[in-house]
Image: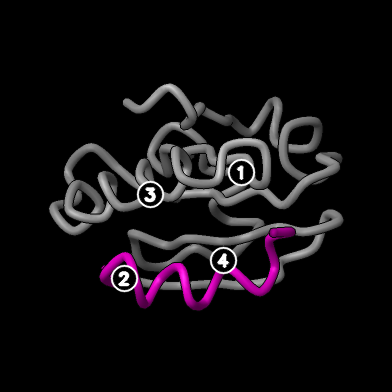
């Protein structure tokens, strides 16, 4: 995993994501999910390219059912960008980096 991508759990979601002072991108994923593995390097590149502007975490849906249910994640990969504790953008499924960043960049301070 890239050094700019962390792990978040049901237990620390509030502190790490909802209370964060910068936008936070969450990658909802599972070990068995092929498309999740395909999007992971893109998420890591976005994290590395935007270190300091956005925090990036992965949340394993199998190990964190409470947060998965709370945000109605029905299909993975699902990416959610939180800003000021609210969902600012939600992306379901694989998306190429340029297209994904175009959806996210408006929410991230340049």
Q: Residue at x 81, y 40 (%)?
A: 20
Q: Which residue is under mark 2?
A: 93
- Label 2 vs label 4, nearer the camera: 2
Report the span colored magenta. 94-110
For label 4, the crowd category at 10 Å Cα-Cα, with few meaning under 14, some 14 to 19 and many 20 or more, is few
Q: Is residue 95 magenta?
A: yes
Is residue 28 positioned above or below 77 on the image?
Answer: above
Q: Which residue is under mark 1?
A: 66
Is residue 55 positioned above or below 74 on the image?
Answer: above
Callouts 3 and 2 close, C-beta under 8 Å = no
Q: Is residue 105 magenta?
A: yes
Q: CA distance from mark 1 to mark 2?
A: 21 Å
- Quarter the C terminus occupies: bottom right
- Label 4 vs label 3, nearer the camera: 3
Label 3 vs 1, first from the N-terminus: 3
Label 1 vs 2, first from the N-terminus: 1
Q: Which residue is under mark 4?
A: 72
């Amino acid at each position: 995993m890239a050094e700019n991508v962390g792990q978040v759990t049901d237990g620390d979601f509030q502190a790490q994501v909802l209370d964060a002072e910068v936008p936070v991108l969450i990658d909802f994923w599972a070990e068995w999910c092929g498309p999740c593995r395909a999007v992971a390097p893109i998420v890591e590149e976005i994290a590395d390219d935007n270190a300091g502007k956005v925090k990036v975490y992965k949340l394993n849906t199998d190990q964190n059912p409470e947060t998965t249910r709370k945000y109605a994640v029905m299909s993975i990969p699902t990416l959610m960008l939180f800003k000021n504790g609210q969902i600012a953008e939600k992306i379901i499924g694989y998306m190429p980096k340029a297209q994904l960043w175009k959806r996210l960049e408006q929410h991230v301070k340049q």
